[in-house]
Image (cartoon, rainbow, N blue to C red):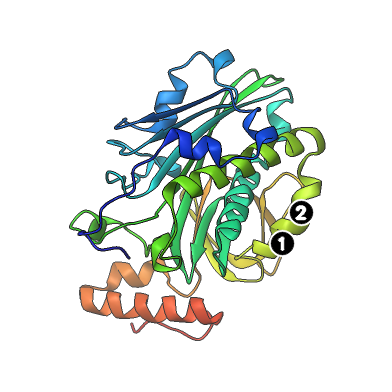
Amino acid sequence: MSTASETPELLDRTLILNGMNCAIRDRLSTLRIEPSLDSTNSELQRIAPEEQHATAILAEHQARGRGRRGRNWHSPHGRNLYLSLGWRFEQALSALGCLPLVVALSVAKALSRAGLKGHWVKWPNDILINGRKLCGCLVEIQGDAQGPIHAVLGVGINVHMTATDETNKIDQPWTDLTSHLPACSRNGLATLVLEELMTQLPLFSSHGFAVFRDAWEQVDGLRGKSVHIESGNHLLHGTVAGIDEHGALMLDNGREVLILHSGEVSVKIDCIWAWYFLRMKNNQMVFSILKKANQAWLSGNTTHIIPPC
C-alpha cells in the first residue's frame, strides 16, 4: 500500500508507445490519455462502433469508474491504471463467451512480465494476490448477435493505492501493485497490458479459447475450492470443477455439475453461510468470522470453520 506523500507518476503517451514492440504498436489505431473521465469504457463507447477497433483510452482519474455487476471502481487521480481498449470480432456473440477470461489472462501475463509472482484469476476476470483484489476487468459488447461484435475491454489495476476514507468503503480486501513491486511504473505497466491484449485478442479471434486452456488452468484460483455462489435469488454450494469450453463455471454440488455463465454469479467462500449473518447483531463477531474465513481461504482450508449460533 502506497503512502499519500508519494508524488504520482503521470501517464505519458510517448513513453507508453516507445516501450511497445514495433509490430504490436502498429496494430494500435489510437492512444488517448485524458486527465479525467466518467469512465474509460463509457468514453470509448461514445465513439462510433466502427471507429472503436484498436483504440485505447487511459485516464488519470475516473469520476464514475465501473466494475462488474454495476459496482463502483475506486479511481483516485494519478494512482492506478484505468484503461479501455476497443476490439472488433467478426464471430457471432455465442463464440465470445471466453472473452472475459482471455482479457484476464492477458493482464495476468502482463503482470508476470512486470515481475509479479503469486497472482491468480478468480473467475471470470478478477486478479488477486494473497486473497486480495489487485485488478478487475469489465467487458462490454454491442453488435449483431451473428456478428460483427464490437467489444470494449476495460482494465483497472491498483498500482499506487493509498488508504483513505474512500478506500475504507471498498467492500472486499484489496491490495496494490506497489506493495509487491515497489519500483513498478504505471507507464511501463500500460505498455505491457496493451501489448498483451493486442497479442492475445487476435489469437483468440483466430483460434478460440482452446489455445488458452493450459494457461487458464495455471492461474485458475477457484478450481477445487469449496464455494457458495449467489445466482439471482439462489444460493448454490459446491466445489469448483473448472470451466467448460464456453468459459462457464462448472460447480459440482455432489449430485450434478451445474453450468454457471459469466456475469450471473458472485463467488464467495463456502464456510460463510448467509443465514448466520441474518442472526448476528454483533458486528465484531461478524468481523472475527470473516477474518478467520479469509485466513482459511488463504491456507486452502475452508471446511472446518463453523460460525457460532
Q: Amino acid at mark 2?
A: Arg
Q: x and y percent of residue 108 in the render? A: 59, 55
Residue at 43%, 18% in the rendered image: 46
State the residue in front, 290 or 3: 3
Q: Is residue 17 left or right of residue 76?
A: right
Residue at 73%, 44% in the rendered image: 246
Q: Amino acid at mark 1?
A: Glu
Question: Does 271 sit above or below residue 174?
Answer: below
As helix, strand or loop, the secondary structure at mark 1 comes to helix
Question: Does 144 sit above or below residue 189?
Answer: above
Residue at 80%, 48% in the rendered image: 211
Q: How many marks?
A: 2
> Few, some or many C-alpha atoms within 10 Å of disc 2 (few <14, some 14-19, many ≥20)?
some
Question: Does 203 sit above or below residue 55?
Answer: below
Q: x and y percent of residue 303 in the render? A: 54, 82
Tell me if I can see residue 261 in this picture. Answer: no
State the residue in front, 101 or 186: 186
The answer to whether the residues at label 2 and label 1 have Cβ atoms under 8 Å apart is yes
Task: Determine which residue is flagged by label 2.
Answer: 213
Task: Determine which residue is flagged by label 1.
Answer: 217
Tell me if I can see residue 161 in this picture. Answer: yes
Q: x and y percent of residue 174 in the render? A: 38, 62
Quadrant location, the N terminus: bottom left
